Image (tube, grey):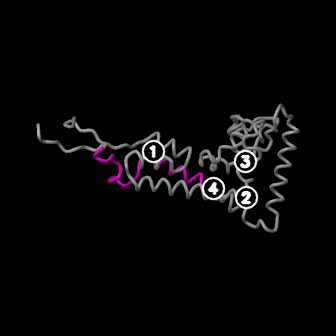
Amino acid sequence: MPGKQSPQTSASPYPDLLAGLLSFVVPGLGQIWQGWRWRRPGRLLKGVVLLLVLHGMFFYGQALGEWKNVFLPQYQQTLDEKFRIFNFPLPDGLANVWWRPAYAAQFWMGISAWPAVWNYCFPESRVFAHYQRSPGALPGNPTRWERDQDIKQFHKKINDLQLRPDMGKYWDVGLLYTMLAGVLNLLVIYEAYAGPFDSTVRTAPPNTASSADNP
């Protein structure tokens, strides 16, 4: 009726696939996007805190391990036979993750952990140089022996690093931090996609919702 407005209804913006993908790429970015889009300062602040905390944990963990504890190796490429689970041969990529389960957790930190994948797939590239380099990944067409020697040299350096008197438990703690950051980001991704538990913040602000009586 003219001169009378019906109550505005708020539509839920969740699930939000885009926000989930954004937090997958950069932890907390999905929440930042939602806070900016829906004009919710608390949501935006939450995203900033998540971004800083998870990245701080991940990079601090790498620093404790002297930037050598995040990598995806090419172990499978040095073997004569495919690795099998229940007699089912795994693709090289999955087999190498099986041999390096720590990276299965680190991967979920998004682009901060993806240089390892880049170096695994493109060993001839110098974009990331020795940052998160993939042991066994060599340019050209390396033989199995060459891959094996590269892996042995890499792990010798890792073992020497862990045995240093000043290293102590820093290696293990650093590795744990990088893995924990990735696992926690799984929760951040889900929270960005599914929305907060509090139902009072699961709806769009009234001024952004559509109403049938509004022009």
* Residue 209, image x, y percentages: 29, 41
**Which residue is labeled 3 in the image?**
132
**Which residue is labeled 2 in the image?**
65
* Residue 58, image x, y percentages: 63, 55
Quadrant position of residue 90? top right
Q: What type is the residue that disc 3 sits on?
A: Gln
State the residue at coordinates (63%, 48%). Answer: 112
Quadrant position of residue 126? top right
Where are the magenta residues, as a range? 178-207
Q: Is residue 206 covered in magenta?
A: yes
The CA span between labels 2 and 3 is 12 Å
Kindly state the secondary structure of the residue where label 4 is placed. Answer: helix
The CA span between labels 4 and 3 is 13 Å
Q: What type is the residue that disc 4 sits on?
A: Phe
**Which residue is labeled 1 in the image?**
193
Comparing 182 with 78, the one in front is 182
State the residue at coordinates (68%, 62%). Answer: 173
